[in-house]
Image: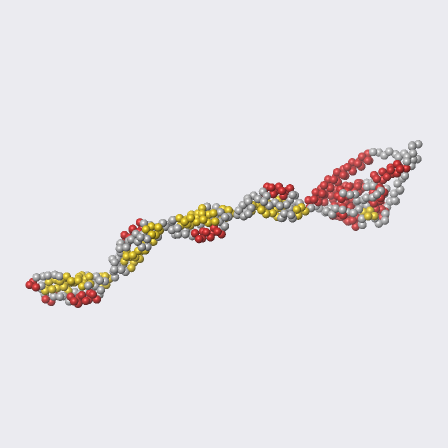
């Protein structure tokens, strides 16, 4: 007979056996063990991975085993608020007291976990089963474990743990392979649970809002790298800026400090330098219009006055040329005519119009004649503007006042008039007279106008001298001639 064993050693062995089966609820209540028991164990491991604590605690293995039989654990989200509801449903279905309410296989549970990883809802069966479990208050069940099992499947309460005494027969040695298989299962479940925990933690952390950093005044490449390192997706837009140098970030959205989920877009605007304006075509415009056009485009006009035959104030040239794009604030030079180069005006008064015009045009002037009635011979220049000795630009106009000639009047016919009457008649018509005497033999012709020039009826200017030939009887037959002019 073997040596007697002490009662404490036997009790330790009993406790050890109960400890090894504390996660196997069907074993604890004496039911058959199948793959649904493994699902329950995996639910325990997953619960601990998610919350950092086991679902049931107690001072003794018996207390823990009774909680496995009769208590409903709190959902994982009650201990870690960021755990999603769908993950709660997966864990609570795996920990259902009734095996019929659990996942019927590991593959079925894996399918729900894959749905959760994709962001899809769990299966309707899981939704219904886990919801029923969650409706039961946490803690001890209604009375005993028997109330959690359907009446058809109730089993008698487990017998009390045996106490081993010295006279008991030696326990039969159990095979080792079931323990090796169980160990391998637990290791595999732990690795799979850790991988699942990492995936779930990454998903939870990716959904957790993170504060946006400040990316202003950073180079585009640095800003892109920093945004990606912070877990966001950079969206870049290039735009001109009056205050920020080329290639630097001058605006961002969201602003620094705002919390957004990882993976969200962060929009940044990168400076392309100062805004640009297209230089307009200014040649031929007035300087006033050209300056206004450049000012509207935020370009700076600079004027240079140059002599030209063009009208003063006309834009002759520009630099840069039209069509070129310049940053705002840049200078555009424009050449503006200040009029022709001044030239001294010669005197052409009293010259014939043709001669005066030729002389002025040779100096680069334009000639504009203005005809007036005047006593000067026709086409004679009697005045000019600008006056002689003044100056004017080449191409400018010199106005000439030109005589149309004296105004004419019909000369009265005074032949056969006595000299006195003839002179009075001519004077009354505005003419003057010049008398030449001619000896005659006929006494009736004495003192009579024999002829005149201009002849009577012809046109002559006022104050024209009319030559009169007057007869005079010669003394002793001698013919003499004399002249006399009336004022």
Image quarter in which the N terminus is found: top right
Rendered location of residue 364, percent (x, y): 33, 50
Task: Give the vertical position of 147 relative to 194 (above or below).
Answer: below
Q: Quadrant of residue 183?
A: top right
208 relative position to 161: left or right: left
Q: How many marks?
A: 0
Q: Quadrant of residue 484?
A: bottom left
Looking at the image, which residue is at 39% across and 50% down?
Answer: 338
Task: Give the vertical position of 356 relative to 47 (above or below).
Answer: below
Q: Residue furthest left?
A: 476
Task: Indicate the colouring scheme.
Answer: secondary structure
Rendered location of residue 329, percent (x, y): 50, 48
Looking at the image, which residue is at 48% across and 51% down?
Answer: 295
Residue closest to the eye, 195 or 343 = 343
Residue closest to the eye, 184 or 426 = 426
Rendered location of residue 80, percent (x, y): 74, 46
Residue closest to the eye, 42 or 435 = 435
266 relative position to 300: left or right: right
Image quarter in which the C terminus is found: bottom left
Looking at the image, which residue is at 80% across and 48% down?
Answer: 138
28 relative position to 439: left or right: right
Q: Is residue 439 visible?
A: yes
Looking at the image, which residue is at 41% across and 52% down?
Answer: 313
Q: Is residue 32 visible?
A: no
Rendered location of residue 206, percent (x, y): 68, 44
445 relative position to 380: left or right: left
């Amino acid at each position: 007979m073997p040596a007697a064993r002490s009662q404490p050693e036997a009790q330790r062995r009993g406790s050890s056996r109960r400890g090894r089966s504390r996660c196997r609820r069907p074993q604890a209540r004496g039911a058959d063990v199948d793959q649904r028991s493994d699902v329950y164990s995996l639910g325990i491991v997953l619960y601990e991975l998610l919350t950092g604590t086991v679902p049931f605690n107690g001072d003794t293995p018996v207390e823990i085993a009774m909680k496995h039989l009769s208590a409903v654990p709190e959902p994982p989200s009650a201990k870690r608020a960021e755990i999603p509801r769908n993950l709660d449903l997966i864990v609570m279905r795996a920990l259902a007291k009734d095996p019929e309410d659990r996942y019927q296989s590991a593959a079925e549970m894996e399918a729900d976990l894959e749905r959760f990883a994709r962001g899809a809802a769990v299966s309707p069966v899981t939704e219904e089963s886990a919801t029923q479990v969650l409706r039961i208050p946490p803690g001890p069940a209604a009375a005993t474990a028997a109330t959690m099992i359907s009446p058809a499947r109730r089993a008698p309460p487990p017998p009390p743990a045996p106490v081993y005494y010295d006279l008991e027969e030696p326990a039969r040695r159990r095979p080792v392979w079931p323990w090796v298989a169980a160990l391998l299962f637990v290791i595999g479940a732990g690795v799979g649970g850790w991988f699942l925990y990492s995936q779930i933690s990454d998903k939870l952390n990716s959904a957790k809002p993170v504060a946006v950093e400040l990316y202003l005044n950073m180079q585009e490449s640095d800003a892109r790298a920093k945004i990606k390192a912070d877990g966001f997706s950079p969206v870049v837009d290039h735009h001109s800026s009056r205050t920020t140098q080329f290639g630097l970030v001058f605006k961002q959205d969201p602003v620094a400090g705002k919390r957004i989920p990882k993976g969200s877009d962060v929009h940044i605007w990168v400076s392309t330098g100062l805004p640009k304006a297209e230089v307009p075509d200014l040649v031929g415009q007035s300087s006033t219009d050209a300056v206004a056009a450049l000012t509207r485009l935020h370009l700076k006009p600079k004027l240079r006055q140059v002599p030209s035959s063009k009208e003063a104030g006309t834009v002759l040239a520009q630099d840069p040329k039209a069509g070129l794009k310049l940053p705002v604030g840049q200078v555009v030079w424009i050449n503006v005519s200040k009029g022709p180069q001044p030239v001294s005006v010669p005197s052409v008064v009293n010259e014939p119009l043709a001669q005066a015009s030729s002389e002025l045009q040779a100096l680069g002037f334009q000639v504009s004649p203005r005809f007036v009635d005047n006593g000067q011979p026709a086409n004679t220049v009697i005045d000019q503007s600008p006056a002689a000795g003044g100056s004017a630009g080449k191409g400018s106009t010199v106005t000439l006042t030109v005589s149309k000639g004296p105004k004419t009047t019909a000369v009265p016919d005074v032949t056969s008039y006595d000299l006195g009457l003839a002179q009075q008649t001519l004077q009354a018509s505005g003419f003057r007279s010049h008398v030449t005497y001619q000896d005659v033999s006929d006494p009736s012709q004495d003192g009579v106008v024999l002829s005149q020039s201009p002849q009577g009826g012809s046109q002559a200017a006022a104050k024209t001298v009319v030559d009169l030939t007057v007869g005079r009887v010669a003394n002793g037959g001698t013919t003499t001639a004399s002249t006399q002019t009336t004022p």
